[in-house]
């Protein structure tokens, strides 16, 4: 999992480069700006899918907490179970509902609708990855609390 988070963190550099290059490509070369945008969208989708998991795992996610962030107490085990009860059904539904369209998109190598560049299917795969990582995070939190109980 650390390797996945490292790879996703490195995606920031080409993403930033592509966003920077869009205007010079559009204004000076007057070509390839859409390709840079499409590739940037793919990298951004993959980056966000993993970044949400990483932020949740590190507890640095923007959230309204019942206890202040500076306290050293560990959260009550029921919170992990409550999170799993909220996120689990949603994640399973999302995986079930998006499985068909994602499969069709991957098998058809779906393209971006405006530019017809290949790769739009990767954005749909990033959705699947995001949902899987959210579910994994909820299961990991419950597992940590189960192991901690004497």
Image: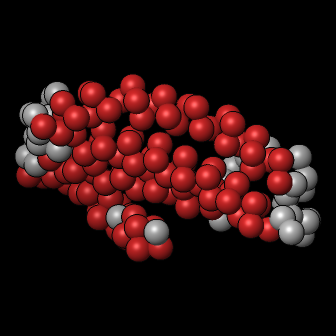
Residue 26 seen in the current view: no
Image location (x, y in percent) of residue 106: 18, 39
Determine the residue positioned at 55% across, 46% down: 135
Q: Nearer the viewer, residue 133 or 60?
A: 133
Determine the residue positioned at 75% across, 45% down: 81
User: In the figure, is residue 15 to the left or right of 3?
Assistant: left
Where, by quadrant of the figure, is residue 17 drawn?
bottom left
Determine the residue positioned at 46% across, 47% down: 132
Q: Nearer the viewer, residue 91 or 118?
A: 91
User: In the figure, is residue 150 to the left or right of 52?
Assistant: right
Image location (x, y in percent) of residue 49: 44, 50
Determine the residue positioned at 47% across, 43% down: 131
Residue 114 seen in the current view: yes
Where, by quadrant of the figure, is residue 97 drawn?
top left
Where, by quadrant of the figure, is residue 6 drawn?
bottom left
Image location (x, y in percent) of residue 5: 45, 67
Image location (x, y in percent) of residue 98: 35, 29
């Amino acid at each position: 999992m650390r390797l996945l988070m490292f790879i996703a963190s490195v995606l920031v550099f080409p993403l930033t480069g592509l966003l920077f290059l869009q205007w010079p490509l559009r204004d000076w070369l007057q070509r390839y700006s859409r390709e840079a945008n499409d590739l940037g969208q793919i990298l951004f989708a993959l980056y966000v899918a993993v970044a949400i998991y990483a932020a949740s795992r590190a507890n640095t996610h923007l959230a309204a907490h019942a206890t202040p962030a500076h306290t050293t107490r560990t959260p009550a085990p029921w919170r992990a179970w409550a999170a799993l009860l909220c996120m689990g059904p949603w994640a399973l539904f999302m995986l079930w509902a998006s499985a068909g369209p994602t499969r069709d998109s991957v098998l058809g190598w779906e393209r971006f609708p405006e530019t017809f560049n290949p790769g739009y299917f990767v954005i749909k795969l990033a959705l699947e990855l995001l949902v899987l990582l959210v579910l994994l995070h909820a299961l990991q939190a419950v597992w940590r609390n189960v192991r901690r109980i004497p």
